[in-house]
Amino acid sequence: MRVAGSLALIVAGLSLGAAAWARPDTDARLYVRPRPVVLGLLFNDQNPLFANNPDLERAINFALDRPALIRTRGRYAGHPTARIMPPTLPGYGTRSPYPLDAPQLTTAQTLAAGNLRGGKATLEINYGFQGLAEEVKRDLAPIGLDVAVRLIPRCATYRCANEPPADMDLTAWGADYPDPASVFASFDRPWFGSPQLLPRFRARLAAALRLSGSSRARVFSQLDSDVMSQAPPVAPIMALNAAMLVSARTHCFHWNLYYGVDLSALCIR
């Protein structure tokens, strides 16, 4: 029997895994699949702390303990990344500009020295991310940055009119279609804190957009690496996953990277 909207699916951010995981206590299956989405810290380059301060942005990328941050979100939350592009896209590089297994505090402290500008930062988060935010606070304390965490105000969609913008936002960005251009377009949207990419990178972005095929993927990959290495607009934490918990009777599971579960294909046996 085919089912679609009548089947209840529990969807959450979890860790990369291709096979279904059976839970013997409930006789259910947990499907875990990658999403073309990255979760990380967005730097507000309009605020005094990060304005023309790429060394501090780089220091934060070196200081983050990405595995510890992921653990605050659960066993299947995702896997570490330090690239703008999610790993599912053509051109995602295998070489990371920042550590993925543990922080490099000596490098981070050297970069932060003389660039802390008072040593205080605000981090704005959505409700439910307090644990991750507290880990960010712990990670950045050794480089001399005191992070104050605040929830996004409820009085407006994004922030209250009289609320000063935070220095950092915990946010996600991703691809709407399988092209690196889709990800870089996020950094030109007003709600994302535009403009983030420096002018010297914009000419390269325009040139990359004129390419196609493997050349396009290769140039975008190098652009991603250079932006993150020289003047990172973000501190990526993890490539997110989706998780779908279904009953043992549910079969015909098909996952589309950009649209999710194919509900029309699901069946019950």
Image (spheres, rainbow, N blue to C red):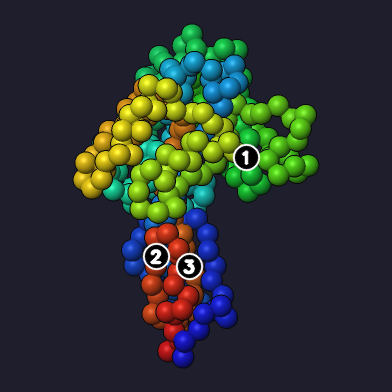
Compare marks 1 and 3 and give the one earlier in the sequence: 1
| Marking on residue 244 | 3
Which residue type carries mark 3? Met
How far apart are the two marked residues, 1 and 3, measured between alpha carbons? 25 Å
Of the numbered discs 2 and 1, the one sitting upstream in the chain is 1
Dividing the picture into quadrants, the one containing residue 98 is top left
Please tell me how crowded label 1 is: few (under 14), some (14-19), or many (20+) other residues with Cα within 10 Å: many
Placement of 11 over or under 67, stated as above or below = below
**What is the secondary structure assignment of the residue under circle 1?**
strand
Residue hosting label 2 = 256
Check disc 1 and give the amino acid type. Answer: Ile
Pick out the residue farthest to the front.
Answer: 210
| Res 215 → quadrant | top left
Check residue 125 in the rendering and tell me which mark sits there, or answer none: 1
Verify CB contact (< 8 Å) between mark 2 and mark 1: no
Q: Please state the total of marks drawn on the protein image.
A: 3
User: Does residue 54 appear anywhere in the picture?
Assistant: yes
Name the quarter where the C terminus is drawn: bottom left
Q: What element carries label 2?
A: strand
Comes first in the chain, label 2 or label 3: 3
* Amino acid on which the number 2 mark rests in the picture: Asn
Which of these two is toward me, 59 or 220? 220
Image spot of residue 47 (x, y percent): 60, 21
**Foreground residue among 75 and 178:** 178
